[in-house]
Amino acid sequence: MSKTKSHSHGIFCWSELCTQNWKEGKNFYTSLFNWGYDDQAIGEGVYYTMLQKQGDDIAAMYEMTKEQVNGGVPSHWLAYIAVDNVDNCAVKAKTLGAEIIAGPHDVVNAGRMLMLKDPAGATVALWQANEHRGCKRLGELNTPYWHELATRDSKVSSDFYCSLLGWTSEIKPMEGMDYTLFLVDGQPIAGMLEMTSEWPEDISAHWMIYFAVKNCDATVNKAVSFGGEICVPATDIPEVGRFSVICDPQGAAFSVIESAMDNV
């Protein structure tokens, strides 16, 4: 897979970890995925760390403030979607029922961002790139591979993102459920499932980031050995692959998938 120089409107372009313990979080992920890193100082003793594969930025992480920790903010991954004009998207998102959490605002010379909560309650960020284009490697092992929205109202969620970003949707029947594919120019770029009554009530709508791995079971075992907790054990999805949901030692949830669809 060739390196990615830019991301088209509507494509997931960046993944960012906000963690309660930057040092331990960095040790966990760099060990699990064999990532390198570049610590960029953003304050006294505070860093924005670029997580890297073979020297290329593929995601990032930073430590949340003491105020956030004391306020009960959990460690979490945040997904970014590339857009052509973040200010226009902010106006449109509000008219569609979203709550603006932060922005739009410039991030130095890197780009312009917006963080919002969609009408069903899932948080996501929009990114208008300048000098920072986003993840430089896609469709490779140990990089972000898939994004999946878990929602309690699939119609509200689908209508929102299709109206905001120009996505189209397609229903794909799966075992015991209908799975929604979101497409850009006819190509699947994300998925959506509806949370049933079996999901704990305290789990709100959210975007889940999947990282591609060579061997799901081996990665799960590594994660456990590094202090991770397995939320969903390694499970097969016919014709899709084998996946697992993991919580890192600070509590941030992510998924790994051994794909049966692509040569990653």
Image: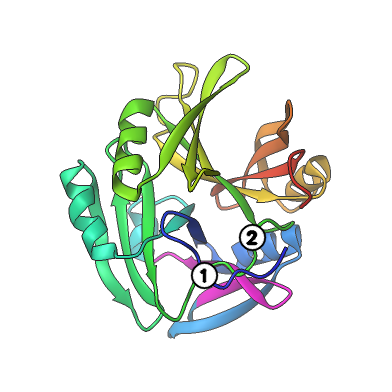
Identity of the residue drawn at 23% across and 49% down: 93
- Give the left or right position of residue 189, taking residue 124 as reference: right
Determine which of the numbered discs, if any, sits on residue 6 in the image: 1
Asked if residue 124 is positioned above or below residue 239 in the image, the reply reads below
Tell me the SS state at disc 1: loop
Check disc 1: other Cα within 10 Å, few if <14, some if 14-19, many if 20+: some
Residue 228: in sight, yes or no? yes
On the image, the x and y values in percent for residue 147 come to 54, 45
Amino acid found under the numbered disc labelled 2: Leu
**Front one among 94 and 247:** 94
Identity of the residue drawn at 30% across and 76% down: 106
Query: Which residue is labeled 2 in the image?
Result: 138
Tell me the SS state at disc 2: loop
Total count of labels: 2
On the image, the x and y values in percent for residue 129 come to 41, 72
Per the rendered image, the range of residues in magenta is: 48-65
Q: Which of marks 2 and 1 is nearer the N terminus?
A: 1
On the image, the x and y values in percent for residue 192 come to 48, 33
